[in-house]
Amino acid sequence: MSALLHVDNITKRFGGFVALDGVEIEVARGERLGLIGPNGSGKSTLVNCICGTLQNETGNVRFDSQVMDGMSAHQRTHRGLARSFQLPRPFHSMTLADNLRIPLLYTVHARSGPLRSPGDLTDRCHELLEMVGLAPKANQMPRDLTQVEMRKLELARAVAAEPKLLIADESMAGLSNSEVEDILALLMRLNERGITIILIEHIMSAVMKFSQRLAVLVSGKKIADGRPEDVVRNPEVVRAYLGE
Amino acid sequence: MKSVTTAKFSLIAGAIGVVILLIAHAVGVDYLYFASYTILQFIVLATAWNILGGYCGYVNFGSAAFFALGAYSSVFIHKLYPLPVPLLIVIGAMVSGVVGLGMGYLTLRLRGSFFAIATLALAVVLQTLVVNWDFVGGSRGAYIIRPEYLEIGSFKIPYIEYLFALMLALAIIALVSARTIERSQLGFGFATIRDDELAAEACGVPTLKLKLIATAISGAFMGMAGAPFPYYIGYLQPSSAFGLEYAVNSIAMPMIGGTTSWVGPLVGAVLLGSAQQYATVTISSAVNLLIVGLMLVGFVIIAPNGIVGLVQERLRRKRS
Amino acid sequence: MDISLDLLINAIIAGLLLGGFYAAVTAGISISFGMLDIVNIAHPGFVILGSYLAYYLNIHLGIDPIIVSILMLPFFYALGALIYQVYHLSFEKRGQDALRGLAFFFGLLFVTEVALILVFGVDYRYVEAAYIGPSLHVGFVDLPLRMLVPCIAALALFAAIQLFITRTFTGRAIMAVSQDQLALQLMAADPIKIKRIAFGLSIATAAVAGALLIIIQPVEPSVGREYIGRVFAICVLGGLGSMPGTLIAAILLGIVESLTATFYGPSWAPAVAFGFLLLTLAFRPAGLLGR
């Protein structure tokens, strides 16, 4: 079976700065991929190029055997790519429930037609909030949330779009150990339901536990890709992380 | 609070409209018709502005241009072949809507401020075009003789009463549309654009398409408000069609009333509109506009959510 | 239409002179909009305010308009710093700069214009100086001093800003604000203070631009509106915040407008800037020199 996501030789420049330099990555259906790299190594830029927030200059992105290049971000979301933002970006003027209603209205409906009744919609929002433990706050506004809750909302909103591939961009930064476990368990459950997941994370214990495969990005180049335990012993990776 | 369905709301709004019409007819003072026409016209303009500005967060400084497009479409058609005013309103809506769409297409893909700047420049350019176009009167202006009466069969309705009724209907249509949009999927989409466009795209919201829809609807309503204007004023000059008061009022009214719901522009237009009608009689129109400008600056600094926001705040505090 | 070579060359030279002046009007916008990302649409309002102050002091005390504008620099700078402080506290800090910040500047533009109407009326006003009237003649080329003097003054202002920005610590900090917040922190500069200085500077240029405007043409309060399209067209075409780009774009617009006025009539000139602006936004939103 062909891979779900094909990132082929993509390059992205900002002015003279090369943020991504010929990056290639493949992700198989149902896989759990960990993506690590020091700050500024281009991880978020890669996510932005895959999701259509930025347009790459060379190379192409294929998803579910479709070429994504030239497609806008919402078109990619409709085709089954969803992401959470590194810094949560909730819709500030809406309640938590309404925040989740947006991907349901605009992506799930666009994909399969408006099958749900308004009642179903509300139920689905609550189900999603339940999943991340925010159900009691359904009618509150995002400004009432803690940073941790904000990250959970961000993740729930990405899941609401019913993606084939979920890219979780540093969903765990600043969380306590037990909260990290919660999020990991949640991601594992989603994966069991057949969602392919790319996890971008700094917390190595979480990455090691979660990932079936690990890719490392340094200065816009992929320097390693393979079994997690092999990758962390790779001398080049060790050097990148610990300095020369 | 139980929410009222759109059908019910339209009925209520329609009924209020009929009552206003009957009262106006009973009073039957020409000056009142003229004054209330202006206020209704501002309700349409403020509501239209708010569909793009308040709901999506994109500022249109060119309200006067869209209004004038409607007005000059009517003048143009009047010179060719006089059509009934309701038809002119439809034509004015189409012309302004299409211009809005075109401008939006060119500038809405870029950052928000570019759109605002382009609308600001649009007014200057359309005015230049009109000043140089003799067919619609050029810089001298165009006379449109308003018939004394509208005759339907044996009925004779004073023309100003007819125009007033049309503008009342337009105001009701604008308010009902705004409220319907607010509660629909479209309205939710607009709000995501105002809050965070990147996140909206990531949730699958086609932001460019929605912005274009908003620009077209907003522009169309402004064109509708302008279409009957030549008949109302009788003598249309570029400087009155592109008047400063349209540009500033259609921003100031929603900003002062409150931008997040249809109530805000209505409150702002009624308050500011009647105050200006009253003040023009007592003080000069320049002082009048100065006050509106100062109020706009004051409100955006001190009460960013407008009068409606202040009232909501008060209610919330009382409850808790 | 008979396009004679004389007319063409004279039109181009008039456009060059006009473009130099446009560069002075746009300099402030290049700083506020281009570098600080503050959409100060009220800028032309302050330019007109500068014109009226030049007019008032020129008529009553007989001071040369350019000297008036130099005397006014500190006041305009203080006004700009004050406006930035209000803008920062009310909008930037609350994260509401997009919608409400624009409405704020629109309100300022409007209030300035109406206040000028109330004080001075809607009649055209002009200044008196020895260089208004006579022309230099070089062959068939006509160089009206009324255009030449403002152009030279404008270029001097422009050069001074460019020197300030590239050669002084504060100037480089302003550039850093626009490009790289991290670099600014490394320079140990307070971004709010730097922005206040920069905005003050941008409004100060309006004093000079205003005096030059009223040397070139008689002024009435609503003239400012014609400049909104122009300055933003130039600023965007010049590539937001690039001073050399701004100068090139200003001269380009000046020449095209002058040609339009010569061959189609002056009443069409305001439309040229808008055409420029739309074409730029549609095809080269990164500006002439942009990549």
Image (cartoon, coloured by chain):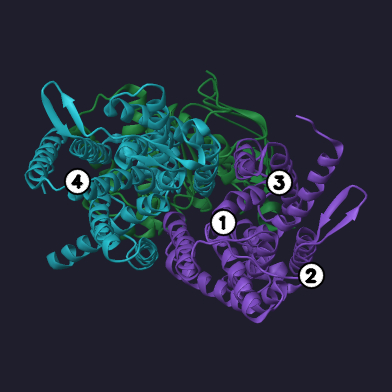
| Residue under the point 45% across and 45% down | B62
Q: CA distance from mark 4 to mark 2?
A: 65 Å
Q: Which chain is green?
A: A
Q: Nearer the viewer, mark 3 or mark 4?
A: 4
Q: CA distance from mark 4 to mark 1?
A: 35 Å
Q: Which residue is mark 2?
A: C167
Residue C136, horizontal then vertical, whole percent: 87, 58
Query: Which subunit holds the residue at mark 3?
Result: C
Answer above or below: position of B170 versus B239. Answer: above
Residue topped by disc 1: C223
Colour that chain C carries in the picture: purple
**Disc 4 or disc 2, which is closer to the eye?**
4
| For marks 2 and 1 on the same chain, the one whose residue lies earlier in the sequence | 2
First in residue order: circle 1 vs circle 3: 1
Alpha carbon distance from label 3 to label 4: 48 Å
Secondary structure of the residue carrying tag 1 is helix
Q: Secondary structure at mark 4?
A: helix
**Color used for chain B?**
cyan
Indicate left or right for A198 with A176 as reference. right
Q: Residues within 10 Å of mark 2 (few under 14, many from 20)?
A: few
| Marker disc for residue B33 | 4
Q: Quadrant of the C terminus of chain B?
A: bottom left
- For label 3, the residue is C253
Q: Amino acid at mark 4?
A: Tyr
Chain under label 4? B
* Other-residue count near label 3 (Cα within 10 Å), few / some / many at <14 / 14–19 / ≥20: many
Asked if the residue under mark 3 is in contact with the one under mark 2, i.e. CB atoms within 8 Å, the reply is no
Q: Residue A4, image x and y in percent?
A: 51, 25
Q: Amino acid at mark 1?
A: Val
Residue type, mark 3 in image: Leu
Q: Is residue B123 left or right of residue C237?
A: left
